[in-house]
Amino acid sequence: MFIQQTGRGPQTVVGLHGWSGDHHTFDPLLGEMPEDYRFYALDLPGCGKSALPQKWEMRSLACEVAQEVIELNRKNMTLMGSCSGGILAVFVSRELIRMGKGDMVKRLVMIDPFAFCPWYFQLFLVPVAGPCMYAAAFANPIGRWITNLFLQDKRAEDTHLTRAFAEVNHRVVWKYLKMLSECGRPDQFRGLNLPVDILFGEKTFFSVRKSVRDWKEALPQAKLIKLKGVGHLPIDEGTKKMAEMVFPQAKG
């Protein structure tokens, strides 16, 4: 699994990107990172420079990522997941606890996380027609332009919600969507004893806002942080505010 390390400070953050992303998802944050931090950005299995996962199933994927986290040999890490990577981060935390390595993670940060597969994504999973609809929306430049235009109220004017799809393996991206639809709801994580910060954009999708409430119900210790004027891409649209939350010593 490809992992990019930035910095060599004693405090550690591990970043798990979301749907259609790779380790570059976290690049905007790195310029705001204090010197006493180090950041590990992963290419999840099948994405970027990483090999395909052993199995297309969320817990199996979480076990693979957990093993990589263990090999970093760091303690008191912040485990951060963006979009669907937020779900994966919770799965990975649970697997680390099951492996007797729960002390490696001191905090979870979930960025604009989904808690379920929205109905409009489930359309892409309908047999035969679903992959065709996915291809029309994401696998060609005109479809991506139209989709991004349609979602203009869910993003800042200078950001692009579908640009990343231009360079992805679309079979892998579709498989990740299918995993999201099959991974279960947040209530399976009730009792997870770990500090959680959930950061979400004020202008994000309704499904994400509903998801944030679902996560709060399952993880009542979670601190909810709404980023004013930000859409579904908080790392790009609210970078300085994000840095203040992710790196407590960061200056705004």
Image: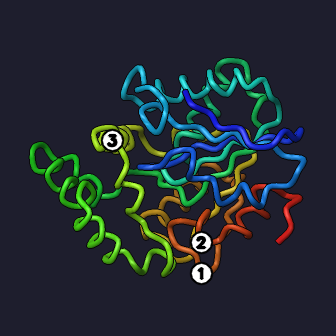
Q: Give the label, 2 or 3, closer to the camera.
A: 3
Looking at the image, tell me whether mark 2 or mark 3 is earlier in sequence order: 3
Q: Label for residue 229?
A: 1
Instruction: State the image coordinates of residue 153 (x, y, percent, origin top left).
Output: 42, 81
Label disc, if present, on residue 242 of the rendered structure: none
- Cα separation, mark 2 vs mark 3, equals 25 Å
Image quadrant in which you'd find residue 76: top right
Please identify the quarter of the rendering in which residue 174 is found.
top left
Looking at the picture, does residue 117 appear above or below residue 176? below
Image-based side of 88 in relation to 251, left or right:
left
- Where is residue 158? Give x, y as percent: 50, 78
Cα distance in 3D space between marks 1 and 2: 8 Å
Q: Earlier in the sequence, mark 1 or mark 2?
A: 1
* Residue linked to disc 2: 237
Q: Looking at the picture, which amino acid does disc 3 mark?
A: Asn
Pointer 1 and pointer 2: residues touching (CB < 8 Å)? yes
Circles 3 and 1: CB atoms closer than 8 Å: no
Residue 173 figure quarter: top left
Indicate the amino acid at tag 1.
Gly
* Image position of 86 (left or right of 148): right
Name the residue at 71% across, 59% down: 223
The residue carrying mark 3 is: 169
Q: Nearer the viewer, mark 1 or mark 2?
A: 2
On screen, residue 228 above or below 183: below
Horizontal and vertical percent position of residue 164: 42, 56
User: Which badge, 3 or 1, comes first in the chain's sequence?
Assistant: 3
Q: Foreground mark, 3 or 1?
A: 3
